[in-house]
Amino acid sequence: MRTLRSAVLIGVVCAASMCGGGGGGNPGGPSPSDNPNQLTISAAGVISPKELVVPPGSRVLFINNHSRHNMTSDPHPEHNDCPEINQVGVLTQGQRRETGNLITVRTCGVHDHDDPDNANVRARIVIR
């Protein structure tokens, strides 16, 4: 009986710890799954849209449905035009990750650092 009570208590504590609260993310902003500003790499390895327009202060959610990609800002290999994009980094199949806050009005090129000439995974984020 004591073992059963302990197991139930452990289950309740584990379930409670998984609910709400903790966990970083984007305080005060949309959660990554609610972010309407998305660039998706399809199962065929093609990013879309090729151009995404967002307002200043936005983040962009990268969703990868393909193999491993290392998403970075142009130009290659410096990646210094829009360093907020470099926070995305390596995405394996099924992963998603947001950029930092894109505050400066500008156009940011995006590419896969490990395959910089692959037009299928090149895009532009226009901040205006």
Image (tube, rainbow, N blue to C red):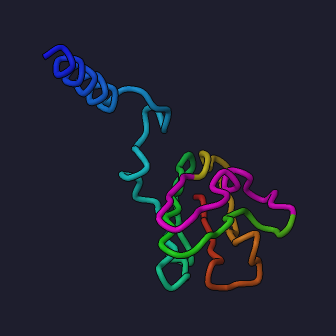
As displayed, is residue 47 above or below residue 30? below
Instruction: Examine the rendering and report whether any part of residue 5 can be seen.
Output: yes
Q: In x, y percent, where is residue 122?
A: 65, 77
Q: In x, y percent, where is residue 8?
A: 19, 23
The residue located at (48%, 38%) in the rendering is 26
As displayed, is residue 90 above or below residue 120? above
Q: Looking at the rendering, which quadrant does residue 108 occupy?
A: bottom right
As displayed, is residue 54 above or below residue 31? below
> Residue at the right extreme?
78
Relative side of 98 to 30, left or right: right
Q: What residue span does the magenta drawing correspond to?
A: 78-98
Please tell me which residue lies in front, 16 or 109.
Answer: 16
Q: In x, y percent, where is residue 116?
A: 76, 77
Number of dots carrying numbers:
0
The residue located at (74%, 52%) in the rendering is 83
Q: In x, y percent, where is residue 77?
A: 86, 67
The residue located at (63%, 71%) in the rendering is 124
State the quadrant of the C terminus: bottom right
* Residue 84 within the segment the image draws in magenta: yes
Please tell me which residue lies in front, 76 or 101.
Answer: 76
State the quadrant of the N terminus: top left
Please tell me which residue lies in front, 10 or 94.
Answer: 10
Instruction: Examine the rendering and report whether any part of residue 39 can be seen.
Output: no
The residue located at (43%, 49%) in the rendering is 32
* Residue 87 within the segment the image draws in magenta: yes
> Residue at the left extreme?
1
